[in-house]
Image (tube, rainbow, N blue to C red):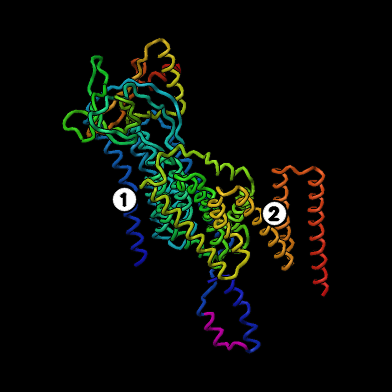
Amino acid sequence: MRNNLIIGLFFCLACAQIITPLSMLTNRESILKSGAQFKFKTEPVDPYDAFRGRYVALRIQGNNAPAPQGVKLNSGQSVYALINNDEQGFAKITSLTTSRPAGSAYILAKVRYSAGERVVLDLPIDRYYMEEKSAPKAERLYREHSRRGNEDAYVVIRVKNGLVVIEALYVGGKRIEDAVKEDRK
Amino acid sequence: MNQKAIKWLYQEIPELVAKGILTQEAAGKIREYYGEIKTTGKRSITLIICGTAGALLIGLGIILLLAYNWEQFSRLTRAILSFAPLIIGQALALWVLLKRPQSTAFKEGTATFLSLMVGASIALISQTYNIPGEMGTFILTWMLLILPLVYLMQASLPAAIYLIGITSWAGSSWDNPLKTILFWPLAFMIAPHFIWALRREIYAIRATILSLIMAICVSCATGFSLGKTWPGAWVILFPTIFAIFYYLGSRKFIGLTSNWQRPLRVISGIGLFVLALQYTFRYIWQYLIAEHESYGFTTIQINDMRALPDHIITLILIAIAILFFYDTVKRKNLILSLFLVVPLLSILAYLLRKESVIIPLLIFNIYVFVLSISRIMQGIRSNNLAVVNTGMLLLAILIVARFFDSDISFIIKGLVFIAVGIGFLATNLFLMRRKEVLNEK
C-alpha cells in the first residue's frame, strides 16, 4: 500500500521533471515558428558557464529607451519594451510601458537603471551558446572586424508575446558558426 | 533503538540465563521484542559508496559532455538528447522502487543519477534556445525538481546536492535580501530527512557526510542571507549558528559516537573557539565601534519592511541558541554550557562595545581563559591526556595571541613562553605518573 503511494508520487514527480524542460522547449519552438523577426546590433564577448557550456555574451546596442512619463522605474523592475525597425532594418526600442501592450511587437525586459531621461534595460538577449572552442574564436573574429571600423555584428531574434528566442548571430554578414569554420581553414 | 546496545544485550543473555537472572522464556521474549540485529556488512557499505560515487561521476560526465555544445546537432537531436538521459534516470529509479525498494545502494545511486540528469536536461534546453537568465534561476528550478526524490527514495546524496544547490543559489542572489532569505524555508524542507538520516545510526557514514555538508552550507548561507541591514551582525550570528550545531552534535539521541562521526560538533567546536579567540583582539571591536562596515550591497535600511524576514529568522536563531543554553544549564552540563554561552557573550559584548572597547576584550579574554582551564581540569579529573592537552593548547594560543597585540618586552615574553612550556610538560608527566599508579593498583 505504502509502496503504491510512493510509486504514484514518483510518477507525479517524474512528470514534473519532464514537463518543466518540455514547456521550456515548446515555448521556444512556438516563438521560433511564429514569432516576429528582428535584428539587433550587438557586440559579442566571451564568458563561461560551468553547467550549460560556453557562450558568447551579447551586449546589445541601443538597450535603452526614453523614460515613460510620470512613472518611476526601479532597477530590477519588469517593463515592456516596444520595438520597431529603423531605416537600416535594425530593431530599435521606441518606448517603454509597464502594462502589456496590445498588438505591436514588444519584449519583456528588466530595468538595469534609470539615468535621467533614459532607462537602460537588461534585455533577455544576453548570450549565444557555442561549442567550447568556437566561443573564444567568435569573440576574436568580432574584434578583428570591429577594428576595421565595421561593427557589423547583429543577432536575429524572434519575438512573440514579449518572449524572445535567438535565431542566429551574424558577424560580417555571415552566420557566426560559418565564420568560425572558415577561419579554421 | 541503538543497534550496538542490542548486540551487547544479546551477548549478555546466555550468561544471564545461565546464572538464573533471566528465565529462558524471558530471554525469548526479549529477543522477540528487539528482533534481529540489523547490521550492514562491509560489502553493502562498499556497494553504497561505490554505487553512489559511480552514479555521481557518470552524471557529472554527461553534464560536461552536453555542455560541450555540439554544433552539428540539429534542434531535434538536441531535444532528444535533452530528454533521453532524464528518462533513463527516471526508468532506473522506478525500477529500483519497484524491484529493490530495500536496497540503500541502489536507491542512493539511482536517485543521485536522476538528480543530475534533471539538471543536464534543463541545461541543454537553456543552451539550445540561448535562454537568458542568471545561474540562480536555473539552479533553483533544478533543486526544486529533485527535492521530492530525497523523500521518495530516502536518498541522502540528492539531499546533499540540494543543500549545495540552494546555498549557491543564495550566494548568487546575495544582493537581493528578500530572495536570499528564502534559503531558510528551502533548507527547512530538508530537515525531516536530515533527522531521519541521523537516527538511522547503522548508516553512520551517510549521516556524517550529510551533517558535514549541512554545517558548511548553513554557515555559508548565514553569511549570504542574514543580518544584512546592521553592521557587525556576524559577531552574533556565527556564534549563534555554531552553538546550535554544537548542541545538536553533542546530544546523545544522535547515535554517533566517535569524533569523526560528529562533524557538527567538531566543526562548530573549532568554529566557536576561533570566533571567541578572534573576539579577544582589539581591532575587531575598534572596527565595529567605528562602524566602518558599509553594507554597500544592499540599499535596504534596518527599519525597512523588506528587512523584516531577515530580522525574524535572526531572532528565531538567537532564541533557539539561548534556549539550548538554558537547557544545558538546567541539566548542569558545565562543559556543554561553556560552549553554548558564546552567543550570549557576543550579544553582551556587541551591546556594550560603545561604552568602552575594554569590555568586549575583557569578556572574551576571560572566557577563553576559563574555557581552557575547564578543559584542563576536566582532563585531569578524568585522567584524559588528550583533553588536558587541548586545554593547554587553547591556553597557549590565548597567551601567544595576547603577545602579538601588546608591547611587552621580549624578556617577559620569553619567560612566559618557558613557563607555559614547563606547565605543559609538568602536567603531562603528572598525569602519566598517576595513570601508571592507577594501573599498578
Query: Is residue A31 one of those drawn in magenta?
Result: no
Which x, y percent locates residue B45? 56, 58
The answer to whether residue A123 shows anywhere in this view is: yes
Q: Which chain carries label 2?
A: B
Q: What residue type is labelled 1?
A: Cys
Residue B438 falls left or right of residue B390: right
Work out whether residue B427 or residue B19 is closer to the camera in this orientation and state it: B427
- Residue of label 2: B394
> Can you say which quadrant of the picture contains the C terminus of chain B?
bottom right
Q: Which chain carries label 1?
A: A
Query: Is residue B30 one of those drawn in magenta?
Result: yes
Work out whether residue B437 or residue B364 is closer to the camera in this orientation and state it: B364
| Disc 1 residue crowd, few under 14, some 14–19, many 20+, Cα 10 Å | few
Residue lying furthest left in this view?
A: A103
Work out whether residue A143 or residue B109 is closer to the camera in this orientation and state it: A143
Which x, y percent locates residue B213? 52, 51
Give the residue displayed 43% in from the left and 46% down from the top.
B116
Give the residue displayed 31% in from the left and 27% down from the top.
A119
Residue A156 falls left or right of residue B261: left
Q: Give the range drawn in magenta.
A: B21-31
Q: Which amino acid does label 2 sit on?
A: Leu
Give the residue displayed 51% in from the left and 61% down from the top.
B322
